[in-house]
């Protein structure tokens, strides 16, 4: 059996968890395994309602006052108990900050393998092989978990699977897991999420994003891109150097140390396409990139490549759009 664990994101199923459901269903159909979905902790009941339509063998609800807000101790204890109870072959989650925080503890508690940040899956007969990036994403490596392990934990990088691939059809059964937690189980508490709180800007739900990189050259040119974003009804985002130089606030940063976004349209302006940027936006439905270097890596994932000088193109495009 495959167990997909849902994560709460401000009352909704986290975008990465939806991709994890698609990953679980894909693995399940390849390996002939049932898929169950666990709604754990914060807003679990609401997540369960939202997951009702997803095709699964069972929906499992695990709630308790002591995990009504996320804590690494509480979540790792409860997930470990669920794993002991239902013995899944694979436990699947999206590779979010929360998962990086607590899933290694589950791996250590139960002494089971954890393959993290997976970008793709291939199969050797009945045995899945997971690819992940190493050495700052310069190389990819294949990992085939030891088949003697009863359970293997997996986390998938954003956009390894698409939530559009989720199979609907509802759940065959709903069950409640009896959570057992004591005060001494929870030794730490978590602070509120840091990014979104200050800004009120939520790039993760934006439909259209205009994203600006170091090719913009100077802070004086930022208003030029802001005008384009305004003409397109888009949110503005950026690569990390633009934030590091203080040209835009940090909550606008997309990438491995910023936000992960998947808009309908990602309009990249003067961004080279370094892997640390790309992991945060490669799930975008359509990607347009302007870059003067035809060899820029961003063109490897762009649907539309505009090879040229952004200083010429952006003002003209804005003018046309304003008409
Ligand atoms: C641990 C770690 C975490 C990181 N996290 C992130 C992250 O979260 N997000 C992130 O973005 N980066 C991150 N980085 C940095 C990342 O490696 C790259 O350095 C960064 O993404 C490059 O930003 P850029 O594309 O804007 O700049 P550059 O790589 O300098 O690219 C600028 C591009 O603009 C083009 N250009 C220049 N002038 C023009 C013009 N006039 N017209 C058109 N095109 C032009 C150039 O051809 C070039 O391709 C991280 C790095 C590390 C080591």
Image (cartoon, rainbow, N blue to C red):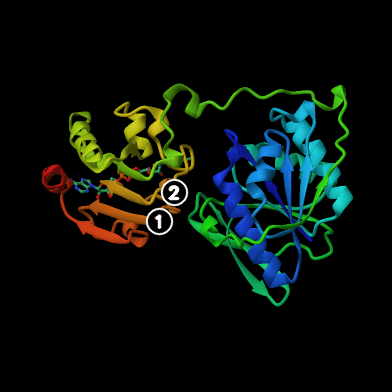
Camera sees residue 117: no
Closest to the observer, 262 or 160: 262
- Is disc 2 placed on a helix, strand or loop? loop
Q: Earlier in the sequence, mark 1 or mark 2?
A: 2
Residue under circle 2? Answer: 262
Query: Is 111 displayed left or right of 44 in the figure?
Result: right
Quadrant of the rendered image containing residue 8: top right
Residue 246 position, x and y percent, is 32, 26
Query: Is 193 displayed left or right of 283 in the figure?
Result: right
Quadrant where the C terminus lies? top left
**Ligand 1 quadrant?**
top left
Q: Residue furthest bottom?
A: 125
Camera sees residue 216: yes
Residue neighbourhood size for the residue with mark 1, other residues' Cα within 10 Å, grouped as few (<14), some (14–19), many (≥20): some
Query: Is 171 displayed left or right of 288 in the figure?
Result: right
Quadrant where the N terminus lies? bottom right
Residue neighbourhood size for the residue with mark 2, other residues' Cα within 10 Å, grouped as few (<14), some (14–19), many (≥20): many
- The residue positioned 74% from the left and 71% from the top of the image is 32
Closest to the observer, 92 or 243: 92
Residue 129 position, x and y percent, is 66, 67
Residue under circle 1? Answer: 285
- The residue positioned 25% from the left and 39% from the top of the image is 229
């Amino acid at each position: 059996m495959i167990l997909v664990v849902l994560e709460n994101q401000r009352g909704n199923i986290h975008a990465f968890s939806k991709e994890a459901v698609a990953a679980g269903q894909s693995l399940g159909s390849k390996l002939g395994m049932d898929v169950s979905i666990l709604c754990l902790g914060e807003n679990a009941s609401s997540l369960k309602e939202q997951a009702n339509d997803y095709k699964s063998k069972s929906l499992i609800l695990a709630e308790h006052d002591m995990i009504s807000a996320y804590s690494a101790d509480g979540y790792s204890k409860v997930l470990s108990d669920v794993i002991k109870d239902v013995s899944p072959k694979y436990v699947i989650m999206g590779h979010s900050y929360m998962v990086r925080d607590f899933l290694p503890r589950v791996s250590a508690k139960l002494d089971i393998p954890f393959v993290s940040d997976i970008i793709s899956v291939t199969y050797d007969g009945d045995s899945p092989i997971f690819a992940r990036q190493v050495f700052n994403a310069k190389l990819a490596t294949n990992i085939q978990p030891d088949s003697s392990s009863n359970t293997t934990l997996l986390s998938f990088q954003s956009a390894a699977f698409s939530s559009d691939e989720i199979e609907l059809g509802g759940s065959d059964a709903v069950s409640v897991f009896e959570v057992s937690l004591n005060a001494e189980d929870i030794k730490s508490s978590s602070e509120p999420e840091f990014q979104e709180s200050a800004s009120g800007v939520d790039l993760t739900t934006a439909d259209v994003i205009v994203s600006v990189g170091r090719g913009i050259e100077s802070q004086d040119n930022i208003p030029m891109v802001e005008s384009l974003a305004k003409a397109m009804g888009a949110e503005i985002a950026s690569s990390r150097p633009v934030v590091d130089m203080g040209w835009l606030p940090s909550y606008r940063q997309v990438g491995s140390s910023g936000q992960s976004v998947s808009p309908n349209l990602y309009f990249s302006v003067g961004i080279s396409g370094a892997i640390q940027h790309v992991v945060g936006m490669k799930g975008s439905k359509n990607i347009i990139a302007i870059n003067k270097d035809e060899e820029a890596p961003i063109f490897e994932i762009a649907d539309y490549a505009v090879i040229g000088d952004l200083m010429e193109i952006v003002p003209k495009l804005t003018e046309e759009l304003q008409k």
